[in-house]
Image (spheres, rainbow, N blue to C red):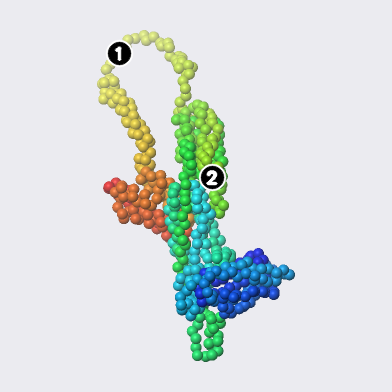
Amino acid sequence: MVVLFCNLVAAQSFTASITKNPVEVGEQFQLTFSLNTSGSNFNTPGFPDFSVLSGPNQSTSMQFVNGSMSQSTSFSYYLAANKPGNFIIQGVSIEAKGKRITAAPITIEVVKGNANAGSNNQAQNNNQQGADLSKSVFLKATTNKTNVFQGEAVLLTYKLYTKIALVNYSISKMPAMDGFWSQVLPMPKELQFRQESINGVNYNVAEIKKMMLFPQRSGTLKIDPMEGECIARIQVQRGRSNDPWSQFFNDPFFGMGQQDVQQELKSEPVSIIVKEPSGTAPEAYTGAVGNFTFEAFLDKPETKTNEAVTLKVKVSGKGNLKLIDPPKTNLPPDIEAYDPKTADNFEVTAAGVSGSRTFEYLLLPRNVGEYKIPPIQFAYFDLSKRDWVTLSSKEFVLKVTQGAGAEATTTPTSKQTDLQLLGKDIRFIKTRSQDWQKEGPHFFTSILFFSLLLAPVFLLLAFLFYYSKNKELQGNLVLMRSRKATQMAKKRLKAAKICLEKKDKEHFYDEIFKALWGYTSDRLGIPVSALSKETAAAAWALKGIGDEHIQQLMATIDRCEFARFAPGGSGEMQQQYDETMSLISNLETALKGS
């Protein structure tokens, strides 16, 4: 185990701090005045409302950093409160570098305690056990915003507060972030402590986890507590003996030992109020919230039939870039388009997500002609204006000529309809009679002839039937997504497999999470923005899925969320991949049997 040290560097100052606030009548506590340089002529007006058990006890420390020396001085008192009330300690000063510095006043709240508090408080304070230890080391979750729009970034920070020595700490449970899309920010490998005062009590504070959250639905969303544990090294008083010298050194201020104590850590839950963007969303809205610019362009204005052209759409700016879906395109029917390829180039910092997301559409013109591609629109909710903004590209003109060996169709012209039969309009005169002989059954009366004659009719009917069914299926988007749910899940799992081979743990669990959540959204016909564990579980139950499969799905989703932040090896990743494949297969089997 490694003891955690903190190097606290502050500006020149003279401050007052206490080990506990409030305190009980008769309870012992420590009052310390700290100067981050050398000083002299320390002056205190006294403590008429407290009993001074010891002090002032002066201590000096020096540090050498990169060849430079720094010195700090502290004066401590051990006091006991005499009566309840609020008491202000002020007027304490010291001389430093030729100037007299006065510490800011500090208020001490004294409350009534038990009758035997005076005899028990010393042991309670020295042992630092039970409820008191929870006030000496704890976790705290803070957000930079508590009232946001749906899709607006929220910075969540988990901090570790301690005023005692820590031997080790660990996080045992991360919150599920239900209703949020989360992105972990990079953190230093070692904790970096700084000093922070709460009600006059100084704590060493270190940030242990930072996450950028994007709320996916409106309402009051609750972030569950983070849980963990630490090993605290506290001071305990040794037992007394009959030896007078031992009794002297067993005084509370001399006979102190150390003990390692395990302490559970748990942050308080945090609530965030999420509002829906005002007004009606434009038709071109695909989930973007923030401040963006937009551009679209073709890689070339001319091409040949069956030769690919790339249409690029680039969204740049600051906001929820990772959650933006591809803009809608309205292409001519003679141009075939494939699903766009997404390329991300952005960074996630404490200031938010900034950069760009590019969508590349592969277009394949089949016929000759000049085609006009209507302007592509991109809409987003502007947080600074608190209103909708719609951006539009220019109209594109794509000229397509006939490619080599391509069976392209063109618009007929009068010249193309002229038939010239040169050398075939005059035939020679036969000089003898022709012997006509019957050579067997005629082709025009055979079964093959009638089969070929009726084949186009049957093919036409089959085509019309397929076309109508396909049209009906495309009109029913929910049914179409449901039928393609397994195919899309396998596609996402392929991406997870690549991350597994690269041992990219964070992106691996990200892809597994998207595969399960996307499969649930497609199969149930519920948008991802409206999904939660409760709605998903209820919808699966209506589909006839048993509790065992539902609980396994929810447990796997929770495990993915936790595994993104917890240490783990490639063996665990392989096991998670196999379990996810098996889970989707079991759900498909259960759906077919229901």
At 36% across and 33% down in the image, what residue appears? 471
Q: Secondary structure beneath disc 2? A: loop
Q: Secondary structure beneath disc 1? A: loop
In the image, residue 243 lies at what x, y percent?
52, 90
Q: Reading the chain from its start, which is encountered first: label 2 or label 1? A: 2
At 53% across and 54% down in the image, what residue appears? 144
Classify 10 Å Cα crowding around label 1: few (below 14), some (14-19), many (20 and above): few
Front residue of 204/32: it is 32
Residue 479 in view: yes
The numbered disc on residue 383 is 2
Q: Label 1 sits on what residue type?
A: Asp
Identify the residue under disc 1. 435
At 44% across and 47% down in the image, what residue appears? 217
Front residue of 132/195: it is 132
Q: In this view, does 449 lie to the left or right of 114?
A: left
At 54% across and 49% down in the image, what residue appears? 353
Classify 10 Å Cα crowding around label 2: few (below 14), some (14-19), many (20 and above): some
Q: Label 2 sits on what residue type?
A: Leu
In the image, residue 582 lies at what x, y percent?
35, 53
